Amino acid sequence: MRWGGDGGGNIEDRRGMGSVGVGGLGAGGVILALVGYFFFGIDPSTTTGMLQGAAPSQQQQQDGVRGAPGDEAGRFVDVVSGNIDAVWTALFRQQGERYERPAAIVLYDRATGTGCGMGQSAMGPFYCPADRKVYLDLSFWQELEQKFGAGGEAARAYVIAHEVGHHVQTLTGASAKARRLGAKGAESGSVRLELQADCYAGVWVAHAAQVSNGRVALDPRDIEDGLRAAAAVGDDTLQRKAQGQVMPDAFTHGSSEQRMRWFRKGADSGDPNACDTFGTNRL
């Protein structure tokens, strides 16, 4: 993967800061909120809102260093996320709309307070719709390679593009549509939302070089790395590794085959309209 030039400067670096509680919920409440989001597709703000109704809120702010990080790993996230924002800015403009980038891409270690509760690295990268920030513990890159066999910069870029895809869904209303659909399992709103975010990651791949004059670009081999990353985090693959069997009724993100197929569809078409996972019977 080729990447270079200036980044978007939308990084909030909290690495080395430790963690701060959010919203007066306590550790149990905030972890419950994120568990609901990652495993059942429930908006964390819904869970935290219910819990806060029974407890006084005492918001604690945790701000990191804003701007472009000086280390290579941080600069990679800055350059890639800036390019992703540039792609979506252009695509929204084509539709006569205005794109608002995420409030920040937050880099952190181990745990950090978020608008959705206490974020922990064990949960992997995530997007919080309540504060419109993407959260990344960069130790996940090693886990992605060592545990899931999906290494390389293109695989890392896929993860960032997928999470920003969730932000796009907040802007377009797809996230709200997924909540209305509800349900669990292979046809749930959660699965449709995640597969659309995979497709949006592919859309970014198709346009990355265009908005950067080639400074950020992915070749066919890089796309294969992205496909391996998508396959590695398919529900069926993770379930098979964890419990030795596949349980489609417990799917939240889609199978490996589905995640690869929708990523490929976005990369081949370059068209966000081709990512309508809510309007198709074949996921």
Image (cartoon, rainbow, N blue to C red):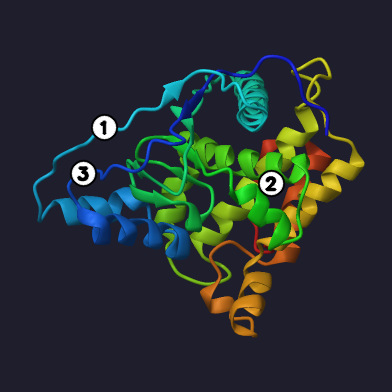
Residue contact between numbered discs 2 and 1, judged by CB atoms under 8 Å: no
Secondary structure of residue under mark 3: loop
* Amino acid marked by disc 2: Cys
Please tell me which residue lies in front, 157 or 85.
157
* Amino acid marked by disc 3: Gly
**CA–CA distance in space, label 3 to label 1:** 9 Å
Pick the quarter of the image with the C terminus: bottom right
Across and down, in percent, residue 249 comes to 54, 78
Q: Residue at x 46, y 54 (%)?
A: 178
Whichever of labels 3 and 2 marks the residue nearer the N terminus, that label is 3
Please say whether residue 261 is visible from this viewpoint.
no
**CA–CA distance in space, label 3 to label 2:** 34 Å
Q: Which residue is mark 3?
A: 23
- Is 60 located above or below residue 150 in the figure? above
Is 156 left or right of 249, judged from the image as shown? right
Is 126 left or right of 92, judged from the image as shown? left
* Amino acid marked by disc 1: Gln
Across and down, in percent, residue 116 comes to 34, 46
- Is 254 located above or below residue 30 in the figure? below
Q: Residues within 10 Å of mark 2 (few under 14, many from 20)?
A: many
Across and down, in percent, residue 273 comes to 67, 39
Please say whether residue 128 is visible from this viewpoint.
yes
**Foreground mark, 2 or 1?**
1
Please tell me which residue lies in front, 29 or 277.
29
Q: Which residue is mark 1?
A: 61
Residue 199 numbered mark, or none: 2
Whichever of labels 2 and 1 marks the residue nearer the N terminus, that label is 1
